[in-house]
């Protein structure tokens, strides 16, 4: 019986260290958007929050924020229309990258080919996509998408 008690004491002593190791690090406060604009969805604004070039890939992130008086529900992608979301730079068009299985490197579509967005009043939803990066000499891009007017002159952050 003493052996069982000693084992419990040893296990109990190591438990706080395990719990402390599992505490998540504080979440960094989001940085200011690069650009903000209205969308075609009532009460929803778009905040362009990231345009990062790393190892030949350009990552784009746009936060959709519901500033309206009710929830917002809409389809961002319909019938797998990922090619409606593209980057332009120096008269060249860059489409969403796809993996070996031709799956877009962006939020996954459902079986019907749609990406539905549901944003509670005051909430947000993050669109992201990966593109081939423009050459290193290109410092700004334009982003064309069906949810609103194009974002223009978005600076690229190199990493």
Image (cartoon, rainbow, N blue to C red):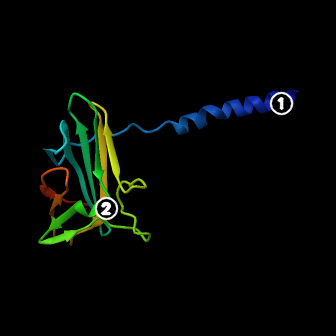
The quadrant of the picture occupied by the C terminus is: bottom left
Q: Please determine whether, in this image, residue 112 is positioned above or below residue 122.
A: below
Q: Is residue 58 visible?
A: no
Q: Quadrant of residue 58?
A: bottom left
Q: Please determine whether, in this image, residue 118 is positioned above or below residue 92.
A: above
Left or right: residue 103 versus residue 73 is right
Q: Residues within 10 Å of mark 2 (few under 14, many from 20)?
A: many
The Cα atoms of the two marked residues, 2 and 1, are separated by 55 Å
Residue 111 position, x and y percent, is 43, 55
Of callouts 2 and 1, the N-terminal one? 1
Looking at this view, is 79 or 157 the one in front?
79
Which residue appears at 15% of the width and 50% of the height? 148
Residue 21 position, x and y percent, is 54, 39
Q: How many labels does the image show?
A: 2
Q: In which quarter of the image is residue 1?
A: top right
Q: Which of marks 2 and 1 is in front?
A: 2
- Mark 2 — residue? 130
Which residue appears at 20% of the width and 33% of the height? 67
Looking at this view, is 43 or 91 the one in front?
43
Q: Residue 4 carries which label?
A: 1
Residue 47 position, x and y percent, is 20, 45
**SS at mark 1 in the image:** helix
Q: Can residue 63 be seen in this view?
A: yes
Looking at this view, is 150 or 48 the one in front?
150
């Amino acid at each position: 019986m003493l052996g069982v008690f000693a084992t419990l004491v040893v296990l109990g002593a190591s438990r706080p260290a395990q719990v402390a190791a599992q505490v998540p690090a504080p979440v960094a406060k989001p940085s200011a958007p690069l650009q903000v604009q209205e969308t075609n969805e009532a009460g929803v604004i778009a905040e362009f929050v990231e345009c990062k070039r790393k190892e030949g890939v350009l990552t784009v992130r746009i936060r959709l924020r519901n500033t309206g008086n009710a929830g917002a529900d809409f389809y961002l992608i319909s019938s797998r229309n990922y090619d409606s979301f593209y980057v332009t730079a120096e008269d060249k068009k860059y489409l969403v990258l796809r993996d070996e299985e031709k799956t877009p490197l962006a939020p996954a579509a459902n079986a019907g080919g749609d990406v539905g967005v549901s944003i509670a009043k005051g909430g947000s939803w993050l669109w992201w996509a990966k593109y081939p990066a423009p050459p290193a000499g290109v410092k700004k891009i334009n982003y064309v998408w069906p949810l609103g007017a194009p974002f223009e002159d978005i600076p690229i952050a190199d990493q």
